[in-house]
Image (cartoon, rainbow, N blue to C red):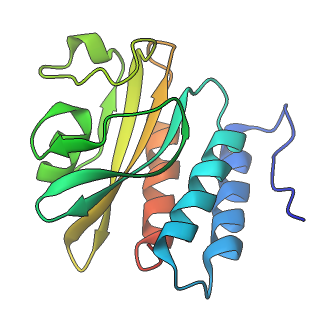
């Protein structure tokens, strides 16, 4: 049985260190990318407070397709360049959005979401997926979150 959840009072840098260790331990040597994404989505759900969705969109034939996640049902397909996820995938760049309602072309899969962090997962310079984090709170995500999730994307890039 795995119990990777950090303590409630764990400082954010330490929580991300523990998240990275847990993600590495769970995915090392496992060749099934879907299984690895599922475990990472669950880790994110447990490690990050104040989120209502944690998961992946996979790049499939030129569009983003829903992958493993934790949270309410979500949009299944997202065109490149559309919404926060589509922009992150098109630009191969992290999108840290403090207020999704102010983001041009935001796709509202869950009406309670107010902020979002989307990090592309790159393999050999190509986007293979994005990690999508949603929160019901405005400005939930910050630069520490960006750095922590970008590091996570690096760890798992050849495992999904």
The structure residue drawn at horizontal position 31% and vertical position 35%, both measured from the top left corner, is 75
Quarter of the rendering occupied by the N terminus: bottom right
Identity of the residue drawn at 65% across and 50% down: 42
Where does residue 132 sit, x and y in percent of width and height?
40, 42
The answer to whether residue 88 is visible is yes
For the C terminus, give its image quadrant: bottom left
Viewer-nearest residue: 67 or 52: 67
Residue 147 drawn above or below residue 100:
below
Left or right of residue 150: residue 70: right
In the rendered structure, the answer to whether residue 95 lies left or right of residue 155 reads left
Tell me if 108 is positioned left or right of 156 in this view: left
Q: Measured along the vertical axis of the image, is residue 158 above or below residue 94?
A: below
Q: Position of residue 30 (x, y in %)?
A: 60, 83
User: Which residue sits at x=85%, y=63%?
Assistant: 2
Q: Is residue 92 visible?
A: no
Residue 153 vertical position relative to residue 66 in the rendered view, above or below: below
Camera-nearest residue between 109 and 96: 109
> To which quarter of the image does residue 77 belong?
top left
């Amino acid at each position: 049985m795995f119990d990777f959840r950090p303590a409630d009072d764990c400082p954010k840098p330490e929580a991300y260190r523990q998240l990275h260790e847990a993600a590495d331990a769970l995915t090392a040597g496992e060749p099934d990318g879907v299984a690895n994404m599922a475990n990472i989505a669950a880790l994110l759900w447990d490690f990050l407070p104040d989120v209502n969705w944690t998961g992946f969109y996979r790049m499939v034939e030129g569009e983003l397709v829903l992958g493993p996640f934790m949270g309410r049902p979500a949009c299944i397909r997202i065109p490149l360049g559309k919404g926060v996820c589509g922009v992150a995938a098109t630009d191969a760049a992290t999108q840290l959005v403090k207020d999704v309602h102010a983001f041009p072309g935001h796709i509202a899969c869950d009406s309670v979401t107010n902020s979002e962090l989307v990090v592309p997962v790159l393999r050999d310079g190509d986007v293979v997926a994005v990690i999508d984090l949603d929160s019901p709170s405005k400005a939930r995500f910050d630069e520490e979150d960006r750095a922590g999730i970008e590091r996570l994307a690096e760890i798992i890039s050849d495992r999904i």
